[in-house]
């Protein structure tokens, strides 16, 4: 049972940087070490300083492209995780397992759209139709008291003008178009990365000097495993928030409950955002029904948030990165300030990458220490086949 060089591109998963580093280093021909003069060292140091500042400027100018590449890497990691799990159980060739993974995910998405599409579409139409009437009902209730009337006056003063609404709608449509095109690029790019993982990861390792390649490979392994564990935990958290929010709002009689649950579940990809994005339409619709329904709606949202933060996430942290809530929140704020909407969407995985780099490069922890709070099986061994 052994892996020959021809099978390496098929068999080594994207997270096995350490194994690739050993192969690449063994293939390289050692070069004789020449003693440098003082002038050459000074010249080389100056070039390094200039190149570092130039690279930092180029990276900042290409930050949107780098964020897109990072998103492609996350999609690739998802595909490879499923593909490797399938191969361990079926012993299928890599290309066949990857194809089945892609077809399975597309089939699952298409089946969900076909099964829930009409219902969800009706729910969103109902949501759009009921929100104005619900807001009018809330205004009527507020206008019966002095405090409520004062709140309405303030709200009307903050209402945007017609031109501002048109400008906002135009900007929103442009953003939606850009998001759809970006999503298509991310999906296609992630598929290409997953189809030839060692081509790209091996190329990255070859750019690293031989003396630093082994620790760099371990750092990349730790990043890949940490992101994989976070993605698994986040998927379960999104499912929990979406389903429980939809069921809870449906039980208390909120219209379009499943549409609101779907929004809450998808938005939970950015931690702590799902419930807050779902809260506005849910509360408006709840109080649009009557006061008791509105109060029950608030209770459901608080209960979901408490269950998510105090029960579900602590349980999932045995299978994901133990990321403190304060670091998560400030990471989202920082990424939003620096990189905009794309930064907010990718803030948590970017924070995980930064934490792994700090623990490896600054605190000098080894890979197992970094992964101590994550999945116990840090990196699954590569599958072997007969020569």
Image: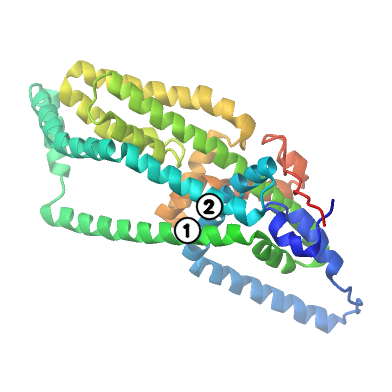
Q: Is residue 262 above or below residue 355?
A: above
Circle 2 — which element?
helix
Q: Is residue 169 visible?
A: yes
Mark 1 → mark 2, Cα distance in angstroms? 7 Å
Residue at 59 percent of width and 53 percent of height: 98
Query: For the view shown, which residue lies furthest in the top direction?
Result: 292
Name the residue beneath numbered marker 1: 186
Instruction: For the residues labelled 1 and 2, say whether their Cβ atoms are less than 8 Å apart.
Output: yes
Q: Give percent across and percent down for residue 240.
A: 45, 29
Name the residue beneath numbered marker 2: 75
Residue 127's mark? Answer: none
Nearer to me, 147 or 232? 232
Residue at 52 percent of width and 22 percent of height: 311
Q: Give percent across and percent down for residue 266.
A: 40, 40
Nearer to me, 247 or 331? 247
Q: Quadrant of residue 38?
A: bottom right
Nearer to me, 123 or 103? 103
Q: Give percent across and percent down for residue 22.
A: 82, 59
Q: Give percent across and percent down for residue 312.
A: 52, 25
Circle 1 — which element?
helix
Q: Is residue 124 above or below residue 284?
A: below
**Among the two numbered marks 1 and 2 on one chain, the one whose residue lies closer to the N terminus:** 2
Nearer to me, 188 or 238? 188
């Amino acid at each position: 049972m052994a892996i020959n060089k021809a099978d390496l591109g098929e068999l080594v998963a994207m997270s096995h940087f350490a194994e690739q580093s050993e192969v690449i280093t063994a293939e390289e021909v050692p070069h004789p070490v020449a003693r440098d003069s003082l002038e050459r060292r000074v010249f080389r140091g100056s070039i390094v300083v200039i190149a570092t500042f130039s690279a930092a400027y180029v990276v900042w100018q290409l930050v949107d492209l780098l964020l897109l590449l990072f998103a492609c890497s996350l999609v690739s990691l998802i595909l490879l995780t499923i593909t490797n799990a399938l191969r361990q159980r079926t012993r299928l060739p890599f290309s066949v397992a990857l194809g089945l993974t892609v077809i399975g995910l597309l089939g699952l998405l298409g089946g969900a759209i076909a099964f829930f599409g009409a219902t969800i579409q009706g729910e969103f139409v109902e949501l759009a139709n009921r929100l104005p009437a619900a807001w009018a009902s809330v205004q009527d209730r507020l206008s019966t008291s002095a405090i409520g009337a004062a709140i309405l006056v303030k709200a009307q003063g903050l209402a945007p003008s017609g031109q501002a609404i048109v400008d906002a709608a135009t900007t929103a449509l442009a953003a939606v178009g850009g998001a759809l095109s970006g999503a298509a690029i991310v999906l296609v790019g992630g598929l290409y990365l997953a189809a030839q993982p060692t081509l790209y990861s091996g190329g990255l390792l070859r750019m690293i000097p031989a003396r630093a390649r082994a620790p760099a490979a371990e750092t990349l392994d730790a990043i890949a495993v940490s992101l994989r564990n976070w993605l698994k935990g986040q998927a379960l958290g999104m499912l929990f928030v979406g389903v429980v929010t939809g069921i809870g709002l449906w039980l208390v009689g909120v219209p379009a409950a499943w549409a609101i649950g779907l929004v809450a579940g998808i938005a939970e990809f950015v931690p702590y955002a799902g419930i807050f994005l779902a809260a506005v339409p849910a509360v408006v619709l709840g109080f649009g029904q009557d006061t008791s329904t509105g109060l029950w709606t608030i209770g459901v949202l608080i209960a979901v948030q408490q269950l998510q933060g105090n029960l579900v996430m602590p349980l999932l942290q045995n299978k994901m990165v133990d990321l403190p809530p304060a670091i998560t929140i400030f990471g989202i704020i920082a990424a939003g300030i620096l990189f905009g909407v794309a930064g907010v969407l990718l803030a948590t995985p970017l924070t995980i990458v930064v934490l792994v780099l700090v623990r490896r490069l600054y605190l000098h922890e080894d890979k197992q220490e970094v992964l101590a709070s994550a999945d116990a099986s840090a990196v699954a061994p590569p599958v072997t086949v007969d020569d």
